[in-house]
Image (cartoon, rainbow, N blue to C red):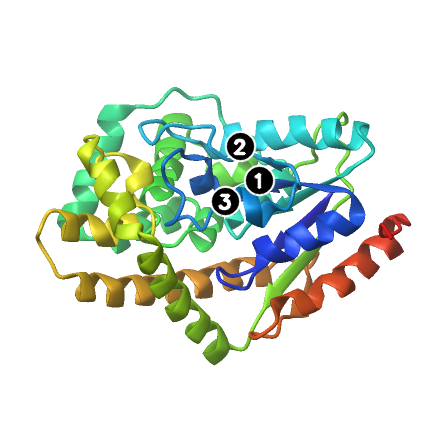
Amino acid sequence: MLVLVGPTATGKSAVAVEVAVRLDGEVITGDPQQAYRGMDIGTAKPSLAERKGVPHHLLDIKDPTELFTVAEFQRLVWELAPAIRARGRLPMLVGGTGLYVTAVLDAYDFPPLEPDWELRARLRGEAEALGPEALHGRLAEVDPSAAARLHPNDLRRVIRALEVYYRTGQPLSATWDRSPPEAVALDALVVGLFMDRDALDRRIEARVQQQLDAGLLEEVAALYRRGLDERYYPLRALGYRELLPVVRGERSLEQARADLVRSTRRLARRQLTWFRRDPRVRWLRTPADNPLAVVEAITRLAQEKWGRRPKS
């Protein structure tokens, strides 16, 4: 399986399509937010035209009222990869959501616990009263490995890690870093894209404006008219949480735009930090003005690893 990772706005989706065309690949999205129907612009979901006929998996499989857990994502990817290989094609996992991608590669073993909604509500109330850093600090005391991988603002996963510890007495990280099931037999080539920081910052600002020009505010308003807001986890995603207050008339679009740019830049830093820890990643510098310049390099790496020859 070819795995393409890196910070947001480095052009992973477009690069993946071009590589897939050359290597008979099929894309599995590694961005769980793209699984939600009606959330297209804010998640940078590739359009049918942008996919260029390349099959894409795990897009539009969930309603925003549903959760798409890491465990479910892992299971679906493990089912898809062998099926794609059986067709003589190359499975390609593409995205920047580190926990989801790493859960596939390192076969995280998720405890089969039913949610304890009362415990989760109590922990969320403590985070609102004391701040997310306080909850993250508590996690660092009982499960430092999980705390090191989770950002304090990733409140849902911090709460889940604490829930596992409180209910089982075992740290969530104890279930990580195992071997995938034998039937999956992942042989992964992991490639990371990165850009110079200033160049990436400019691309992020430009992309936010492009999303707004493409109708991101209208997309958020349509979801809000369906009764969807921050009570539903998908609507806390980047882009949606900043614009929901605009839809409700609680802040200006300009304020929200500035916040979205800042939040996206912070996300890019966190994504890079996550993947920088993984020694498997083969990093490629991506020109800001031409991200597709790395397509040939990725194609060569795949050919060296598996002997796959590009289509003429």
Amino acid type at image mark 3? Asp
Q: What is the C-alpha distance between the residues marked 3 and 1?
A: 13 Å
Point out the frontmost of discs 2 and 3. 3
Picture disc at residue 31? 3
On the image, which quarter does residue 92 sit in? top right
Which residue bears the numbered disc 1?
103
Q: Secondary structure at mark 1?
A: helix
Q: Residues within 10 Å of mark 2 (few under 14, many from 20)?
A: many
Amino acid type at image mark 2? Phe
Q: What is the C-alpha distance between the residues marked 2 and 1?
A: 9 Å
Relative height, residue 165 to residue 188 (above, below):
above
Is 99 or 97 nearer to us in this picture? 97
Q: Secondary structure at mark 3?
A: loop
Is 44 or 80 nearer to us in this picture? 44
Mark 2–mark 1 CB contact (< 8 Å)? yes
Amino acid type at image mark 1? Ala
Question: In x, y percent, where is residue 204?
Answer: 42, 67
- Which of the two labelled residues, at mark 3 and mark 1, occupies the earlier sequence position? 3
- Which of the two labelled residues, at mark 2 and mark 3, occupies the earlier sequence position? 3
Relative height, residue 244 to residue 118 (above, below):
below
Picture disc at residue 73? 2
Relative height, residue 184 to residue 262 (above, below):
above
Q: What is the C-alpha distance between the residues marked 2 and 3?
A: 10 Å
Question: In x, y percent, where is residue 126?
Answer: 18, 43
Picture disc at residue 274? none
Q: Residue furthest bottom?
A: 198
Question: In x, y percent, where is residue 73?
Answer: 53, 32
Point out the frontmost of discs 2 and 1. 2
